[in-house]
Image (tube, rainbow, N blue to C red):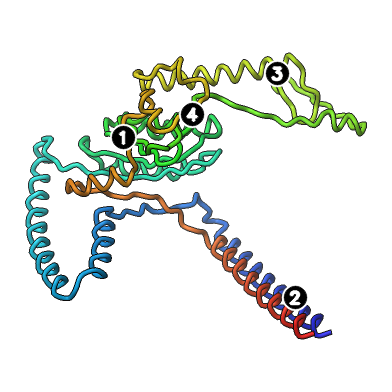
Amino acid sequence: MELLQEYGLFLAKAVTVVVAIGAIIGLVAMAGQAKRASKQGFIQVRKYNDDITNMGETIENMTMDKFQLKQRRKAQQKKQKQELKQAKQEAKKSKVAKEENTDDIKAQHYVLDFDGDIRASEVDKLRMEISAILAVANKQDEIIVRLESAGGMVHSYGLAASQLARIRKADLNLTICIDKVAASGGYMMACLANKIIAAPFAIVGSIGVVAQVPNIHKLLKKHDIDVEVLTAGEHKRTLTMLGENTRKGKDKFMEDLQITHDLFKDWVSEQRPQVNIKEVANGDVWYGQQALNNHLVDALGTSDDYLQQLTKDKAAVILVSYEEKKSVGEKLGLAAASAFETLSARFWTRSNQNDVQH
């Protein structure tokens, strides 16, 4: 009986929360209906050099005694004064260089991350980051993309590659770092780079095209279920999941796959003429060292190696990411989910306690 009371109390609370949140969402939707627009976000910028310095200082603080820390602080203060003086001189020099349109401008190294799923969902984020950088970048600057993708839909990765092509079109240096995998559509993007750096065991390649379509026609036929596929246009539907696939339809589908593969091979050959496309365009993948031997990449190493070397060379390394603002509805949805989880946890905890007591 007590368990039923507990459940009733929990249900009442849950219903109250859901109704209240629904009312708030409704009011917000009504208020903002006339002002609906595309979701806006903001560019987030962070200096990688500072991240490395802060991490190093944290370790030093734990390993040094008081005297060593005091000496280090004095040395740091002296170094900071020198760096500030040098920065002012370089800023003045850079300003003069820009006015005189000379090449004596300190290069910036912008770092982007692309983690690709089958739909290349991060392409919208990538396009905003590239647009922001192109608005301020000079020809001496470098854009570094830490790329991870096993590929996916042709049109989605075609757009993602086109975004990187904007960098090359602007005559900026593009470096792609592959720490884990850049295969198929991922390599379609990577081959646009002036320089490709891959970790020794990163997976690279898969210059091929694959498609699979499940077909349950025989299962439906076994249960006397007919599916009629009606089309206007000979090639409107070559293969189907439910209807019977014909030899003519399969041949047309294979023809389309071959056309896509030829386009992929032409793309890689155009971007990396040093690659023997006949040897590598069979769908195989290679680890970093093998990829280097096949000229699919230019050097071995991790993105961490590359970025840290830049910081050691006193280069400015800037992390850039585009973050979308969450709408009020999304924030309320997250709050509702959190509240529901809390109520559920409380109910189940009390129920389990009652079970144990009884």
Name the residue nearer the viewer: 107 or 19: 107
Q: Which mark is residue 274?
A: none
**Left or right: 15, with 61 as reference point:** right
Between the residue at mark 1 and the residue at mark 4, the CA separation in whole angstroms equals 23 Å
Between the residue at mark 2 and the residue at mark 3, the CA separation in whole angstroms equals 55 Å
- Counting residues from the start of the chain, the first of labels 2 and 3 encountered is 2
- Counting residues from the start of the chain, the first of labels 3 and 1 encountered is 1
Check if mark 1's residue and mark 4's residue have beta carbons within 8 Å: no
Q: Which residue occupies 89% across, 32% down? A: 225
- Counting residues from the start of the chain, the first of labels 1 and 2 encountered is 2
Disc 2 target residue: 11
Q: Which mark is residue 174?
A: 1
User: Tag 4: residue type?
Assistant: Val
User: Tag 2: residue type?
Assistant: Leu
Quadrant where the N terminus lies?
A: bottom right
Quadrant where the C terminus lies?
A: bottom right
User: Tag 3: residue type?
Assistant: Lys
Secondary structure found at label 2: helix
Query: Dot 4, how many residues are within 10 Å of its Cα: few (below 14), some (14-19), or many (20+)?
Result: many
Decide: is 343 above or below 297: below
Query: Dot 2, how many residues are within 10 Å of its Cα: few (below 14), some (14-19), or many (20+)?
Result: some
The image quarter containing residue 199 is top left
**Left or right: 224, with 260 as reference point:** right
Between the residue at mark 1 and the residue at mark 2, the CA separation in whole angstroms equals 57 Å
Disc 4 target residue: 285
Disc 1 or disc 2, which is closer to the eye? 1
